[in-house]
Image (cartoon, rainbow, N blue to C red):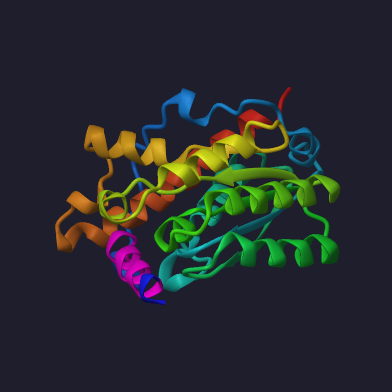
Amino acid sequence: MRSVFWLAAALAAVWPHGMTAAEMAPAVGCDVPADLVAPAQPLAGLGRALQPGGRLEILALGSGTLLGLRGGVEGSVPEHMVESLRAAAPEATVHLTLHAARAETAAAMLAGMRKELVAHPYQLVLWQTGTVEAVRKLPPAQFRDTLAEGTAAAAAAGADLVLVDVPFSRLLEDNADLQPYRTAIQDVAGQGQAALFRRYDLMHYWAKTGTIDIEAAGKGERNHTAERLRTCLGQALAKLVLAARGP
């Protein structure tokens, strides 16, 4: 239980919430290297869903880092992704359903995913996970099995799946071993039934180049930097989805 409170405190520092509308600032200059958003294989359903007259229903599952302003959909990474998809495919309908909660495990998310896939038809599932497992030191093999079950469930429901890996954070890496969980996500995505969004590598690139670095930002700039990060991650996710839809 102690690790849960540590995780909440750590992520609140790294991913601040609770901005007012006046504090929001639009992101500019989202530098997204093409190789970091290049899908390993096309996702079959996306091409049809994003055609003129098509409909793309998106289910996004995750923990606290997927949430936006005030811990909700507004300003979240998936919402920014949807905005970019609508701009790129204006004649298609794109709808988002977001289920995310702080400190939620992949196993809990899997249960929610199964219920949603039975109740509604989705063409795309985004699944962000791994950080909670790393902080709690849950068995990586068990985590991998959960991811494999979720991948199979999405495929059985006819939904394309994008796995979103853990965030880059010096604070997290000082207190948790992220690599076994990153490896599990990469292994499952490498089986060919899911695309991988390399969030860790992208955030590390932005921090290294000084483009976006929440942990290096001053206290007065942290909210603006967090909003810029969410916006740029959403735009990068949209680039991955658009690239994965194929010709």
243 sits to left or right of 175: right
Q: Residue at x 73, y 36 (%)?
A: 193
> Is 132 included in the stretch rendered in magenta?
no
Q: Residue at x 63, y 63 (%)?
A: 107
Quarter of the image containing the N terminus? Answer: bottom left
> Is 9 included in the stretch rendered in magenta?
yes
State the residue in front, 144 or 11.
144
State the residue in front, 25 or 185.
185
Image vertical order of residue 59 relative to residue 198, above or below: below
Residue 83 is situated, as x and y percent measured from the top left of the image, at 56, 50
- Which of the 4 image quadrants contains residue 176? bottom left
Asked whether residue 98 appears in the rendered view, the answer is no
161 sits to left or right of 140: right
Q: Main secondary structure of the magenta part?
A: helix
Q: Residue at x 52, y 70 (%)?
A: 101
- Which of the 4 image quadrants contains residue 19? bottom left
Q: Which residues are the magenta region?
A: 4-17
Q: Residue at x 78, y 53 (%)?
A: 122
Residue 139 is situated, as x and y percent measured from the top left of the image, at 53, 55
97 sits to left or right of 81: right
Residue 221 is situated, as x and y percent measured from the top left of the image, at 20, 58
Image vertical order of residue 226 relative to residue 6, above or below: above
Asked whether residue 84 appears in the rendered view, the answer is yes
